[in-house]
Image (cartoon, helix red, strand yellow):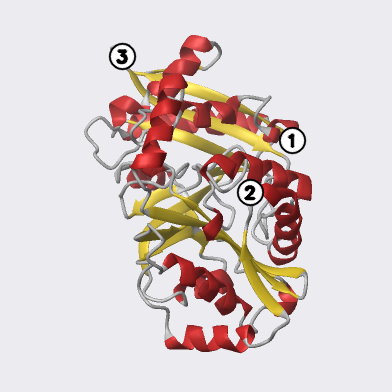
């Protein structure tokens, strides 16, 4: 087997198309948009290049056929609570069911990371934000949400046989959004709703700047500094909202206010993969027209939770139940098309958020992903991600 650096347009294209052979008989795989993967490796599109660098390789068997791929990266901004070593990352791993092939890919990434002064590697993760391409599926091998990793079950053995250890689990929950919330949830909701100082509303596409400021205020107080989450400026949020605007459903992006100050956010989006799975990875003119047609005539029945947060001064006082209840009023109405709901992953190190998710009602664990860590010093004590307070 030979390993080859991705260093030109041909090999970059091979990196994108290699998964087609791995998943050709897997009905649950949804081909990501080529552009969404390519953007990760484009310095003009990915701000992670300001703080790091990335290298990609392809693996070829003795018959000249491609049989695997991997990316390795360093990012000065990538840190987890409790880290006492310099940690790099690997991601975009794909491989045939062959441990020797997997070991060749892992060894290549490890050697390059060691040359960069790195002492451990986490994977499979993204060269960038944690909201996409993060973790290995270990349970729940079903259609992935938009920009969520998906893999065959045998990848678990490829990672663990090499020596990767479980750093943290990424728990996903789903539920029937039409099922009633618990009586306790409504009781807590009513306690807040009876206070005239509280109000709730959904985002308006014509006033994105106002809601970007509200989102940034809540997000930074609730999450920045927790589990690797970074501060977000109003400008960053506004840019994100503008990107989301064509697919945003205003009714499922909700805010709660105390007087005029935003105190909670509940951000959801239609699951774009329910449309994109019909586009075969492409998003040229014809696919854009097809997408618009699908969006108009094929209502999306599944939506996914992206961000939920309550500012610290109102946590544990019922505001979480209030914003959930206000959201449920519309989602459970006849006007709502949604019959499926899945939350993006929550780290097992975040019991507070896990408890909020479980309190939504009749939730079940839909899938489980894992972020693995491999310490280069095999004698060093391995520690899992610490629990957040």
Q: Indicate which disc, 3 or 2, sits on the residue closer to the N terminus.
A: 3
Nearer to me, 162 or 135? 135
The vertical placement of 169 against 11, above or below, is below
Q: Residue at x 75, y 54 (%)?
A: 210
Secondary structure under the numbered disc 1 in the rendered image = loop
Quarter placement of the N terminus: top left
Quarter placement of the C terminus: bottom right
Label count reads: 3
Q: Position of residue 255 (x, y in %)?
A: 64, 65
Nearer to me, 129 or 283? 283
Question: Where does label 1 land, which residue?
Answer: 51
Does any portion of residue 385 appear in the rendered image? no
Q: Residue at x 78, y 70 (%)?
A: 260
Q: Position of residue 244 (x, y in %)?
A: 58, 43
> Which is closer to the viewer, label 3 or label 2?
2
**C-alpha gap between disc 3 and disc 2:** 55 Å
Question: Where does label 2 land, which residue?
Answer: 205
Q: Residue at x 40, y 40 (%)?
A: 296
The vertical placement of 364 against 305, above or below, is below
Q: Residue at x 63, y 57 (%)?
A: 203
Whether the residues at callouts 3 and 2 have beta carbons within 8 Å, the answer is: no
**C-alpha gap between disc 1 and disc 3:** 37 Å
Question: Tag 2: Cα neighbours inside 10 Å, few (<14), some, or many (≥20)?
Answer: some
Question: Where does label 3 land, which residue?
Answer: 62
> Which is closer to the viewer, label 1 or label 3?
1
Answer left or right for 51 relative to 322: right
Question: Tag 3: Cα neighbours inside 10 Å, few (<14), some, or many (≥20)?
Answer: few
Q: Indicate which disc, 1 or 2, sits on the residue closer to the N terminus.
A: 1
């Amino acid at each position: 087997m030979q390993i080859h650096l991705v260093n030109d347009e041909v090999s970059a294209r091979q990196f994108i198309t290699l998964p087609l052979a791995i998943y050709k008989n897997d009905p649950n795989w949804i081909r990501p948009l080529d552009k969404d993967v390519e953007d990760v490796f484009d310095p003009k599109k990915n701000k992670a290049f300001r703080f790091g660098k990335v290298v990609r390789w392809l693996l070829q068997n003795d018959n000249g056929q491609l049989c695997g791929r991997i990316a390795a990266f360093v990012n000065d901004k990538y840190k987890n609570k409790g880290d006492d070593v310099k940690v790099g990352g690997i991601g975009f791993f794909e491989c045939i069911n062959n441990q020797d092939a997997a070991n060749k890919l892992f060894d290549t990434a490890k050697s390059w990371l060691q040359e960069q002064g790195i002492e451990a590697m986490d994977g499979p993760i993204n060269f960038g934000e944690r909201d996409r391409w993060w973790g290995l599926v270990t349970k729940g091998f079903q259609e992935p949400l938009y920009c969520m990793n998906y893999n065959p079950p045998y990848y678990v053995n490829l990672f663990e046989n090499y020596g990767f250890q479980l750093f943290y689990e990424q728990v996903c929950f789903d539920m029937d959004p039409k099922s009633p919330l618990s009586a306790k949830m409504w009781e807590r909701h009513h306690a807040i709703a009876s206070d005239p100082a509280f109000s709730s509303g959904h985002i308006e596409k014509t006033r994105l700047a106002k809601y970007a400021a509200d989102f940034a205020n809540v997000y930074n107080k609730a999450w920045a500094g927790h589990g690797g989450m970074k501060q977000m400026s109003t400008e960053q949020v506004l840019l994100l909202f503008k990107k989301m605007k064509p697919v945003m459903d205003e009714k499922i992006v909700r805010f709660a206010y105390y007087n005029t100050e935003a105190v909670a956010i509940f951000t959801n989006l239609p699951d774009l993969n329910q449309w994109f799975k019909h586009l075969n990875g492409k998003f040229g003119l014809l696919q854009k027209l097809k997408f618009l047609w699908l969006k108009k005539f094929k209502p999306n029945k599944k939506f996914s939770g992206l961000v939920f947060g309550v500012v610290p001064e109102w946590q544990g006082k019922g505001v979480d139940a209030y914003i959930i209840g206000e959201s449920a009023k519309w989602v459970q109405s006849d006007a709502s098309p949604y019959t499926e709901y899945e939350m993006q992953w929550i780290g097992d190190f975040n019991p507070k958020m896990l408890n909020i998710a479980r309190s939504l009602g009749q939730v079940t664990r839909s899938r489980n992903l894992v972020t693995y860590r491999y310490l280069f010093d095999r004698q060093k004590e391995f520690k899992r991600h610490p629990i957040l307070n």
